[in-house]
Image (spheres, rainbow, N blue to C red):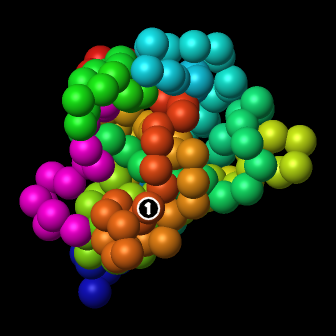
Amino acid sequence: MRKIILVSAVFLPLLAACSIDLVDEQGGGGRSAGSRVSVKMFTITAKGTGDDIGTLMLMDSRGGLRIEPALGSLPPGAHGFHLHENANCGAGMKDGKMQAGIGAGGHFDPRATGKHAGPMGNGHQGDLPALKVNTEGNAFEMMHALHLSVNDLRGRAFVIHEGSDNFSDQPKPLGGGGARIACGVFPAEK
C-alpha cells in the first residue's frame, strides 16, 4: 500500500501539470481556441470590389465558429450570409452578364451535399445564420456557425447577399438571397 501512495504522490503533480497545459492550449476544452482573426469586408458590384465596410472577427469556440461582425453601410434588414468556396471577390460572367462576386464560387460544400439547409442543417457547410442589419445600416450581432472552424476558412470568402435567406432551395435556390453585395477573403495562409 505504501508503494502505491508513494507512486501516486510522485506522478499526481505531473499529471495535473499536463492537464493545465492542455486546458490552456485548448481554451477550456472542445475546439482549439486560438487567437482571433479578422476578415475585411468590402462592397462588391459587377465592376469589382468597392468600399471597405468593416470587419468580421472570427475565432473558434465551443459553439463552433464565433463570428462578430462590425459592419456598416449595408441595407437594413436580414441578409443571406455564407462562406463561399473560393478566396476571390471578383466580378464574373453569369447568365450572359457581369455580376458581383462570382469569383467566390458557390457555397462551401466539402461533403458535396448539393443542398442549402441552413446553419443547423445537413447541407452546405458554408450556410451561416442570417446577417441582421439595423436601421442605421450596421451589423454587430454575434453569431455562431456550428459546422465551421477557423481552419475551414482558409482560402475561402464570406459573402453577404442583398436579400434574406429562407434556408431552403424552394421556392428559389440557395435561400433566395439574390445578388451578392459584399465580400471578404480569408487568405489560404494567415
Residue drawn 60% across the image and 36% down it: 57
Q: Which segment did they paint magenta?
A: 102-115
Farthest front residue in view? 96
Helix, strand or loop under label 1: helix
Q: Is residue 6 magenta?
A: no
Above or below for 152 versus 181: below
- Relative height, residue 114 to residue 141 (above, below): below
Q: Nearer the viewer, residue 84 or 101?
A: 101
Horizontal side of residue 39 vs 68, given as left or right: left
Q: Nearer the viewer, residue 149 or 184?
A: 184
Q: Is any part of residue 48 visible from this angle? A: yes
Residue 141: give x, y in percent of width and height.
73, 53
**Which quadrant holds the N terminus?**
bottom left
Q: Residue furthest bottom?
A: 1
74, above or below 147, in the image: above
Name the residue carrying label 1.
176
Give the image location of residue 4, x and y in percent: 27, 78
Give the total of numbered labels.
1
Residue 88 in which image quadrant: top left
Instruction: Tell me if mark 1 has few (under 14), some (14-19) or many (20+) residues whose alpha carbon lies within 10 angstroms of its own.
Output: some
The quarter of the displayed image where residue 68 is located: top right
Q: Residue 92 at x, y = what percent? A: 28, 22
Query: Which residue occupies 73% across, 56% down?
Result: 77
Residue at (10% x, 59% y) in the render? 112
Q: Residue furthest left?
A: 112
User: What secondary structure is the stretch in magenta mostly built from?
Assistant: loop
- Label 1 is placed on what type of residue? Gly
